[in-house]
Amino acid sequence: MPISIMQRVNMLKSLGRPTIHEYIPLLFKDFTELHGDRYFSDDPALLGGIGFFNDVPITVIAQVRARSIEELTRINFSMPHPEGYRKALRLAKQAEQFKRPVLCFIDTPGAYCGVGAEERGQGEAIALNLHEFMMLKTPVLSIVLGEGGSGGALAIGVCDELAMLENALYSVISPKGFASILWKDGVREREAAELMKITSEDLYSFGICDRIIAEPEGGAAQDIALTATNIAEWLGSALKRLSAEDCDELPEKRYQRFRKMGVVKE
């Protein structure tokens, strides 16, 4: 039975949705977390490290969701600070140096926009990631696990292939934010969600998403192991495709991929 857009919105906000901490042991062996941006601090809202997928070393960069109120506070409601994005870039550049592929897990309502984050250069950190990820001479894959919100998601979403879990959403702003700005009425969230075309099916039809990864009926929480198996199937095939590419040519192909997105009407 199809799930409505608002059922998806509520599902993704739920603390019961599986997080990267549950997927990592199902997908990777000998995962080692790496910390810090070498400028300010470590950001718990963005996890990074190195693990083995089918005996191949891979750099993992992931936005963290919570399974409890306490964790929700610790990870700043899944909204990374600039040091999180700088950590992601540090690890991506390290991966390029050692010729490791990069896998990014997107799951955030957006980057944190508080005073401290702005003082430490939130906009600059996101912009630099967009530029540098575009130029990486190593395969970059991204998957939207849940919410993919605004520049906070796109900062680790510049990639060679993008996948989305079946019930994931990817958008420039949340439906409630859309309604609040456009109509000055956050209550019209449902109407906004239906207008925005932000589901995995919508993004696939637009050519932005390359693969929709199936979830069990009722969502990923119903069978995390099955969902992880489906992710692994896509990841294995994507890495096989990209391993055949000349890494020196990846930046130009990535650039052309993004240049084709969007429709302009005059």
Image (cartoon, rainbow, N blue to C red):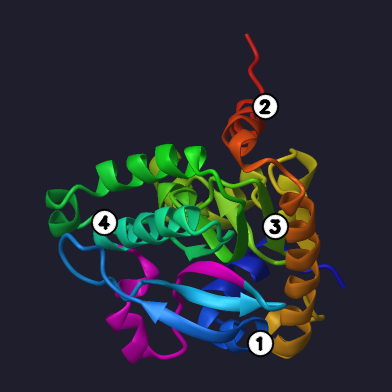
**Badge 3 or badge 2: first in the primary sequence:** 3
Callout 3: 10 Å neighbours few (<14), some, many (20+)? many
Q: Amino acid at mark 3?
A: Ala
Q: Quadrant of residue 104?
A: bottom right
Q: Quadrant of the C terminus?
A: top right
> Separation of disc 4 and disc 2 at Cα?
29 Å
Callouts 2 and 1 close, C-beta under 8 Å: no
Identify the mark at residue 260; answer none if there is no mark: 2
Q: Which residue is mark 4?
A: 82
Callouts 3 and 4 close, C-beta under 8 Å: no
Q: Which residue is mark 1?
A: 26
Callouts 1 and 3 close, C-beta under 8 Å: no
Q: Residue at x 62, y 56 (%)?
A: 141
> Separation of disc 2 and disc 1 at Cα?
35 Å
Identify the mark at residue 163; answer none if there is no mark: 3
Q: Quadrant of residue 78?
A: bottom left
Magenta residues (range)? 57-80
130, 246: nearer the viewer: 246
**Badge 3 or badge 4: first in the primary sequence:** 4
Secondary structure beneath label 1: helix
**Badge 1 or badge 3: first in the primary sequence:** 1
Vertical placement of 218 versus 184: above or below? below
